[in-house]
Amino acid sequence: MATNKPEAISMATRKVSALETLFARIFRIVAGKEYLISIHWSPGRRSYSRPLRPSLIKLVLGTAAVLLLGLACLSFEMGRWAVDEVRYHLALTYHHRYIADLDGVQTTFGSVETTLDTVFDQERKMQALYGINYPGSGYSTFGVGGGGAIPPPMIPPFPVVCTKRCSRLC
């Protein structure tokens, strides 16, 4: 059945763009066909009918693209936030573990320091008991690392005479 109407011929030979094809697939309509969109807000009012134009198709697809981009950025930021939270909590557990280790070391050093103070007090009591702390005696003459009494300095029996040869040494 052939028609001689120019509108029917132009509709049959019209090329459909890729954007219109995508829109038709999303909303399950036939691409290239003229549609009317009817908007009905309330039962007491008339509905508004508008033709489906390429500008409306672009508006709907652009809005969907912006929304999709926003959701992608939101999911990326949420992923980054989750990774940062995991890293923070992991570092926090390491920090608490290191603080506990430090407290243990400080406790150990505190007990060692107390022991050293006690040993030093005992050494002073022993020095007083044995009469070692007389004038001229040092702390190094008794206790750990003390080598006993310090020998008196060596005084040569003859006077030292410096000559020109050994003047640098005297």
Image (tube, rainbow, N blue to C red):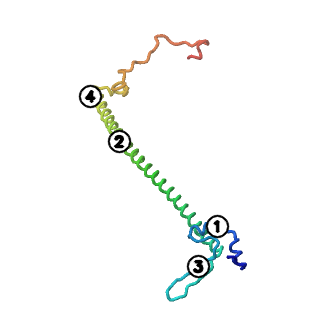
Residue at 52 percent across and 83 percent down: it is 41
Estimate the x, y position of residue 98 in percent, counting from the top left.
40, 44
Q: Earlier in the sequence, mark 3 or mark 4?
A: 3
Q: Quadrant of residue 65 in the image?
A: bottom right
Provide the residue designation for mark 2.
104
- Residue holding disc 3: 37
Assess whether mark 4 and mark 1 are in contact (beta carbons under 8 angstroms). no
To which residue does mark 4 refer? 129
Three-letter amino acid code of the residue under disc 4:
Leu
Q: Give the alpha-carbon distance from disc 2 to disc 1, as whole Å.
A: 70 Å
- Seen from the viewer's position, the closer of residues 11 and 56 is 11
- Identify the secondary structure beneath mark 2: helix
**Real-space Cα separation, disc 1 to disc 4, in angstroms:** 106 Å
Is 54 placed left or right of 78 in the picture?
A: right
Question: Callout 1: helix, strand or loop?
Answer: helix
Q: How many marks?
A: 4
Image quarter (top left, top right, bottom left or bottom right) of the C terminus: top right
- Residue 100 at x, y percent in the picture: 37, 45
Q: Does dot 3 land on a helix, a strand or a loop?
A: strand
Out of 54 and 102, give the one closest to the viewer. 54
- Residue ID at (46%, 54%): 85
- Amino acid residing under circle 1: Leu
Q: Residues within 10 Å of mark 4 (few under 14, many from 20)?
A: few
Q: Amino acid at mark 2?
A: Gly
Mark 3 and mark 1 in contact (Cβ < 8 Å)? no
- Determine whether the residue tagged by mark 4 lies in a helix, strand or loop: helix
Q: Nearer the viewer, mark 4 or mark 2?
A: 2
